[in-house]
Image (cartoon, rainbow, N blue to C red):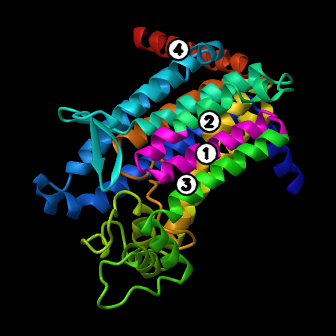
Amino acid sequence: MLSSVRREFDRVSAYPLTTYYLILVSVLALTSLGLVMVLSASSITSYDGGEGSSFAYFNKQAGFVALGIVLMVVTSFFPLHTWRKVSWWALLLGVVMQASVFLPGVGKSTKGNANWIQFGGFQLQPSEFLKIALAVWLGAVLASKYGKMTTFGHAMVPVVPGIIIAVGLVVGGNDLGTGLVLMAMSLVCLFIGFFPWKYFLLLFGALAAVAAFFVFSSQNRLQRITAALTGHADQTASDVTGQAWQSNHGLFSLASGGWLGVGLGASREKWSWLPEAHNDFIFAIIGEELGLLGSLAVILMFVALACGMMRVILRSKSRFVQIATAGLFAWLIGQAAINIAVVTGLLPVIGLPLPFVSYGGSSIVASLLAVGVILSFARTEDGAPAAIRVHKDRVRSSFAVLARKRKK
């Protein structure tokens, strides 16, 4: 019995398109669940906020999901050399868009975060797309410099200036959470790209110093850290809007869910008790309405996505693919881990959405676009092109059989 199961597992694992379908199915499952939970978590806020409908946020998110899926499908067919060619232009466009947040009349600040641009009624967070550009650019540059980074100048240029510009523009807009994600992406890409250790440690120290400076120079961030380290003990009856309010109510939401949850749509915390219930703290609503089992299902979906991305890294022969995918892995999986750790009280509140699940147009479109990039990489795995041709032939044969039956 066990031997037959093992043989079947080995057969499925060796199939060239397993990686492709593992990534695609897990992302579609997360996105579908995200739409359902956005509707549930935002219904009260949407109606109470003057939108006139409990479906207002859901309708916007559904539109963004549709756009993201179209972009994901289209980019999944891009050949590998296309990503290499556009890598410099992608980073340049991402930097220009991020720099435009500082232009009067274009940049927009939301809750102290100045990383938005607005044209009329259209609003965009360029840092989400800068993540994709940085990963692809680092993949292309580090792959071309592999084995040649023997001197300080050759190792540092243009890698380090590109990282500093990208991170600096984001942190300059007071978005340290996204800045930390970009730092993590950069370090992972450098590690996978065999960046020389002495320069790697130097850059790691510099980025850590920058992060520490922005943390300790902000009273708000220090209070968040203190609230997390003290077990939210600063929350008192007279301090109902303190730093621990959101964290405490996130934990209340998770605790009240039990094993199976209170039922879809039956959350109590979403009734204006838990801030950002449909966004950064949507995992708390999942825990409350779907219980521990629902929360574990979400985590398992991210584990499946992580396994798919790891397969791309391990099975690809292209160093560009390995480095770029590692950077996107650090973003999507790393940010998911941070978000869940924040909601469960393991980390201080940072303000990062749960990829594919949280509400946010820029976030969902950029995340699905990143998956399109990864899927295009997965299609280059050994044996994948032949397997795709076999699938196409089967589809054509099926349509031909159906056509003959109709004629009869």
**Residue at x 49% of width, y 70% of height:** 222
Circle 4 Cα neighbour tier, 10 Å, few/some/many (<14 / 14–19 / ≥20)? few
Left or right, 373 with respect to 149, comes to: left
Q: Are marks 4 and 2 in contact (CB under 8 Å)?
A: no
The residue identified by callout 1 is: 183
Left or right, 168 with respect to 49, comes to: right
The residue identified by callout 2 is: 21
Q: CA distance from mark 1 to mark 3?
A: 16 Å
Three-letter amino acid code at disc 4? Answer: Val
Three-letter amino acid code at disc 3? Answer: Ala
First of labels 4, 3 by sequence position: 3
| Mark closer to the observer (4, 3) | 3
Q: What is the number of the mark on residue 336?
A: 3
The residue identified by callout 4 is: 401
| Mark closer to the observer (2, 1) | 1
Quarter assignment of residue 385 = top right
Circle 1 Cα neighbour tier, 10 Å, few/some/many (<14 / 14–19 / ≥20)? many
Circle 2 Cα neighbour tier, 10 Å, few/some/many (<14 / 14–19 / ≥20)? some
When the figure is inspected, residue 121 is found, relative to residue 30, above or below; the finding is above
